[in-house]
Image (tube, rainbow, N blue to C red):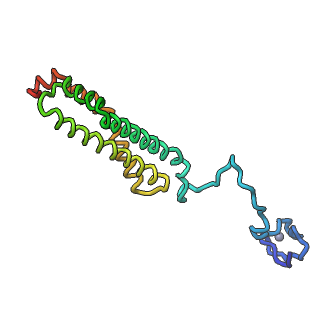
Amino acid sequence: MNSGFCVHCGAALGPGHSYCPRCGGARWQPPEQEQRPRPPSPLRPPAHGPGEPGAHDRRLRLLPYLFAAGAVFWLIQLAQFAAVLAAPAGRDVLRQELISAGIKTDLDTVLVVESVIVLGLEIGAAALHAVAYYGLRRLRAWGWVAAVIAAAAWSIVIVGIPILIFLFRRPTREACGIG
Ligand SMILES: [Zn+2]
């Protein structure tokens, strides 16, 4: 410790003075000497100010995994549908479903179109959720956009599926002159 001056009153301080002899104020010390490095505590994550980048990281911590779960869900759906399509018995089940839905002509064409649409939607949904997962983890704008599209699609599915079922019911179709 060198000679210096009191930061409170300006009095001269000798090398051995930890406190000012005139006003009793504590001697100013550089932060490096003042603070001992603290070991990181698991109970106290590093503090961020409200405006600093990283302040929202903790709030986003679980959100990406929601979309990772969505990607896994769609990959499972994709694998199941591909397994049905790959097996002749599975294709027969799909044909029976089309017949019971009232489709009588061009059964195989309808089956191919339906399969392409379903496979495309499932691949797209899995990819969208994967993009949302990686993008949200890296706090990227494209991740947020993908997450919003995926969340919007989910809300459409949840609201739209009962309406679609109603539209595809035989009485509704016959009332509209279809099938
Ligand atoms: Zn002083």
Measured along the vertical axis of the image, is residue 21 above or below residue 131?
A: below
| Residue projecting furthest to the left | 177
Q: Residue at x 41, y 53 (%)?
A: 143
Q: Residue at x 20, y 23 (%)?
A: 100
Q: Nearer the viewer, residue 108 or 14?
A: 108
Q: Residue at x 77, y 71 (%)?
A: 7
Q: How far across and how far down the image is residue 121, in percent?
A: 30, 43
| Residue projecting furthest to the front | 88
Residue 163 visible here: no
Measured along the vertical axis of the image, is residue 90 above or below residue 125?
A: above
Q: Residue at x 25, y 42 (%)?
A: 116
Q: How far across and how far down the image is residue 86, in percent?
A: 31, 37
Side (left or right) of 154 relative to 140: left
Q: Nearer the viewer, residue 179 or 177?
A: 179
Side (left or right) of 19 relative to 57: right
Task: Identify the image quadrant of residue 161.
Answer: top left
Q: How far across and how far down the image is residue 93, in percent?
A: 27, 27
Q: Nearer the viewer, residue 117 or 129?
A: 117
Task: Identify the image quadrant of residue 122.
Answer: top left
Q: How far across and how far down the image is residue 83, in percent?
A: 35, 36
Q: Quadrant of the C terminus?
A: top left
Q: Nearer the viewer, residue 154 or 54?
A: 154
Measured along the vertical axis of the image, is residue 59 above or below residue 73?
A: below
Side (left or right) of 36 relative to 52: right
| Residue projecting furthest to the top | 171
Count every numbered label the image shows and give the total: 0
Measured along the vertical axis of the image, is residue 46 above or below residue 28?
A: above
Q: Quadrant of the N terminus?
A: bottom right
Residue 8 visible here: yes
Ligand 1 is located in which of the four quadrants?
Answer: bottom right
